[in-house]
Image: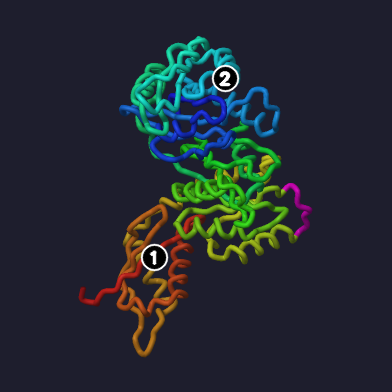
């Protein structure tokens, strides 16, 4: 996606994420009055005056802090700065210039990128005296905004547009397939995305819960464009101590809501857990296409029965999503990761598959001949005809004489007959049964 990239940087707690959320028009980045809340690069599509661009939020920079997480935050910010066309350097207009602001300014000057100095938290028309301190940074006249009150954003975005290279695409993007990686913390979701992208796109450490936000990464494979979404992962409720982690759970569920395909990543050394079942059930109930990726398969001692035994356990535990293909991978070694991407393409095609009404009714009629519909008290279920009314997921409306006669087992039988002809691997199938009289 050859799109202009705008990156927001600054020290912790100057309101970067609040500004980010205001510009993109929704609450994507977690915002809380605590340093270090945003850790990874958060990407979102933004638009101003019909000009579309990619906006990146970064973690707060503290150049002298050698903490492990803070070191990774700096690495992520460095990557974002390198890829940006224009940088919004956000400072706290009320607090005034700090030594950390000076250090961040030095980093930005060395980058050679275009920088717009943004004084945030200016909630009143009166200009605070401390604003003039920022002129000594040599980054031009500060732009006064309030991310909290949405003041001054129009002027800021007008200025941002001036820095877009002429060769960048600013038109609205074609639809991309959203693939969300779900699962409990520390199963390797971030490592898997990093391997696919070929870069350290999200912070990866051995500290559970490192990813707090849902992280979007744009990626092309074959003829399709994808957004790969990393999520924080769900813990058991009793282990959710911080309010921020509660936000992360909400973000994970929201990421599932806006996804097309969910890849449930399971740790091969632990097997399926209660958290895996819960998040998978949420995705299934919301009609999402599903793939089960068993990660860390390289760590398992195997014999001739290991694969089938593990697969059987998965099918028994996750019986409600028997349609989901299972693949055994290693994000560390790259084992079968390319096959996972091929599988994503296949599942996406199935998610969008549409069957003509004529072919569908041929399948239904054949199914009825092979296995008569159920009856109750002398009344037998009659199926008149069916039609597919939607994709993503595929949905079928079937007209029958009495909805009370449609038993769950016969609905499953019809689903299996449709799958035997068209597969629909990776995607749920939804039915709606409508009652009508024979003469209707």
Q: Marks 2 and 1: which is nearer the front?
A: 2
Residue 311: image tag = none
Q: Which residue is mark 2?
A: 98
Q: How many marks?
A: 2
* The magenta segment: 298-304
Q: CA distance from mark 2 to mark 1?
A: 61 Å
Q: Residues within 10 Å of mark 1 (few under 14, many from 20)?
A: some
Residue at figure coordinates x 45%, y 52% from the top left: 350
Horizontal relation, residue 295 to residue 291: left or right: right
One can see residue 395 in this view: yes
- Furthest residue to the left? 439
Give the camera-side residue of 46 and 88: 88
Give the camera-side residue of 282 and 35: 35
Residue 431: image tag = 1
Q: Secondary structure at mark 2?
A: loop
For the N terminus, give its image quadrant. Answer: top left
How did the renderer colour the structure? Answer: rainbow
Question: How far across and down, in percent of the image, does residue 356 sit?
Answer: 34, 58
Residue at figure coordinates x 73%, y 53% from the top left: 269
Q: Is residue 300 magenta?
A: yes
- Furthest residue to the bottom? 377
Depicted 345 relative to depicted 195: above or below: below
One can see residue 219 in this view: no
Give the camera-side residue of 144 and 10: 144
Give the camera-side residue of 189 and 225: 189
Question: How far across and down, in percent of the image, does residue 133 sit?
Answer: 50, 14
Q: Residues within 10 Å of mark 2 (few under 14, many from 20)?
A: few
Depicted 41 relative to depicted 363: above or below: above
Residue at figure coordinates x 71%, y 55% from the top left: 270
Question: How far across and down, in percent of the image, does residue 49 sit?
Answer: 31, 27
Q: Secondary structure at mark 1?
A: strand
């Amino acid at each position: 996606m050859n799109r202009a990239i705008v990156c927001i940087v600054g020290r912790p707690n100057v309101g970067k994420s609040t500004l980010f959320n205001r510009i993109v028009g929704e609450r994507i980045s977690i915002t809380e009055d605590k340093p270090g809340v945003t850790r990874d690069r958060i990407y979102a599509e933004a638009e101003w005056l019909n000009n579309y661009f990619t906006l990146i939020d970064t973690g707060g920079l503290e150049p002298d802090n050698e903490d492990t997480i803070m070191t990774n935050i700096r690495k992520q910010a460095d990557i974002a700065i390198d890829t940006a066309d224009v940088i919004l350097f956000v400072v706290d207009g009320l607090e005034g210039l700090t030594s950390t602001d000076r250090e961040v300014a030095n980093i930005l000057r060395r980058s050679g990128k275009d920088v717009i100095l943004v004084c945030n938290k200016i909630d009143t028309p009166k200009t605070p005296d401390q604003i003039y301190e920022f002129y000594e940074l040599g980054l031009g006249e500060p732009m006064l905004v309030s991310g909290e009150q949405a003041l001054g954003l129009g002027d800021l975005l007008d200025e941002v547009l001036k820095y877009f290279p002429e060769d960048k695409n600013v038109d609205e993007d074609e639809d991309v397939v959203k693939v969300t990686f779900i699962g409990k913390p520390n199963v390797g979701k971030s490592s898997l995305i990093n391997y696919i992208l070929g870069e350290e796109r999200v912070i990866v450490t051995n500290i559970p819960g490192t990813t707090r936000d849902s992280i979007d990464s744009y990626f092309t494979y074959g003829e399709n464009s994808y957004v790969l979404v990393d999520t924080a992962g769900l813990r058991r409720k009793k282990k959710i101590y911080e309010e921020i982690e509660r936000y992360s759970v909400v973000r994970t569920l929201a990421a599932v809501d806006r996804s097309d395909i969910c890849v449930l990543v399971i740790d091969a050394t632990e097997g399926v857990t209660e958290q895996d079942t819960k998040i998978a059930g949420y995705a299934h109930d919301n009609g999402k296409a599903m793939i089960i990726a068993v990660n860390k398969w390289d760590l398992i001692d195997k014999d001739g029965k290991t694969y089938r035994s593990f697969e059987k356990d998965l099918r028994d535990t996750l019986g409600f999503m028997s349609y989901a293909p299972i693949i055994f991978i290693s994000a560390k070694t790259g084992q079968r990761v390319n096959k996972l991407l091929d599988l994503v393409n296949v599942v996406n095609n199935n998610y969008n598959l549409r069957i003509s009404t004529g072919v569908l009714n041929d399948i239904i009629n054949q199914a009825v001949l092979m296995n008569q519909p159920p009856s109750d008290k002398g009344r037998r279920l009659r199926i008149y005809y069916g039609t597919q009314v939607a994709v993503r997921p595929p949905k079928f409306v079937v007209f029958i004489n009495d909805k009370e006669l449609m038993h769950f087992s016969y609905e499953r039988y019809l689903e299996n007959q449709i799958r035997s002809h068209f597969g629909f691997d990776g995607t749920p199938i939804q039915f709606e049964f409508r009652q009508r009289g024979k003469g209707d």
